[in-house]
Image: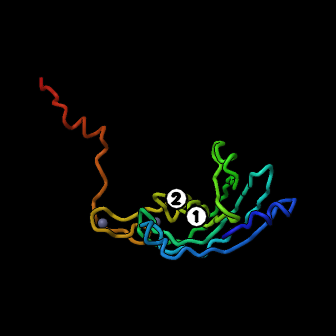
Amino acid sequence: MRLYLPEIVRANKPLVREETIEFEGIEREVPQLVRLDPVRVRVKALEENGLFHVSAEQRARAVLTCSRCLSPFEKTLSGQWTQVFTNRADRAEEGEICFVEGDHIDLTPYVREAVLLEIPYAPVCREECRGLCPECGADRNRETCSCRTERIDPRLAVLKELQIPED
Ligand SMILES: [Zn+2]
Ligand SMILES: [Zn+2]
């Protein structure tokens, strides 16, 4: 997704652009990401004293792997970000401003970065997902296995170890 700087200057009001970006192969980089649909991006850009203020809203449907039950599930990833760019070397010194050479800003890397940040590190298909049985691997959302995985209450375990002196 590229913005043409002279066009933003000429617009004299926020320039709005919408685009759909496909990130091929991004699934290979994130283990919990099964599939990412094309990302819908809406960008507003405004020029002010040689600085280009860009704000973006983005949204995409994704299929993720639940970290508890390992089932795939759908989730909408949405987010927003802002970034200031300049093509003037004298302004690029200031703080978080990105210097761009030439007449275009390429926003695709920023969209990509934002998508990656929206993917949870340990996604869950639903809050009450019961996960897999650590003994037999059964999906505890769907079946009840006969494994005895309940633990002894640690407070009781302590009592068990106490030697009670006999009279
Ligand atoms: Zn789950
Ligand atoms: Zn089991």
Q: Residue at x 29, y 50 (%)?
A: 151
Q: Quadrant of the C terminus?
A: top left
User: Circle 2 sits on which residue?
Assistant: 127
Marked residue nearer the N-terminal end (2 or 1)? 1
Most extreme residue toward the left is: 167
Q: Amino acid at mark 2?
A: Glu
Answer whether labels 2 and 1 touch (C-beta < 8 Å): no
Q: Amino acid at mark 1?
A: Pro
Q: Residue at x 61, y 64 (%)?
A: 111
Q: Residue at x 80, y 51 (%)?
A: 48
Q: Nearer the viewer, residue 97 or 50?
A: 50
Does the Cβ of the disc 2 residue fall within 8 Å of ligand 1? no
User: Circle 1 sits on which residue?
Assistant: 109
The answer to which quarter of the image holds residue 59 is: bottom right
Q: Nearer the viewer, residue 166 or 1?
A: 1
The answer to which quarter of the image holds residue 142 is: bottom left
User: Which numbered dot is residue 159?
Assistant: none
Give the image's coloring scheme: rainbow
Most extreme residue toward the right is: 12
Point out residue 56 in the picture as x, y percentages from the top left corner: 70, 60
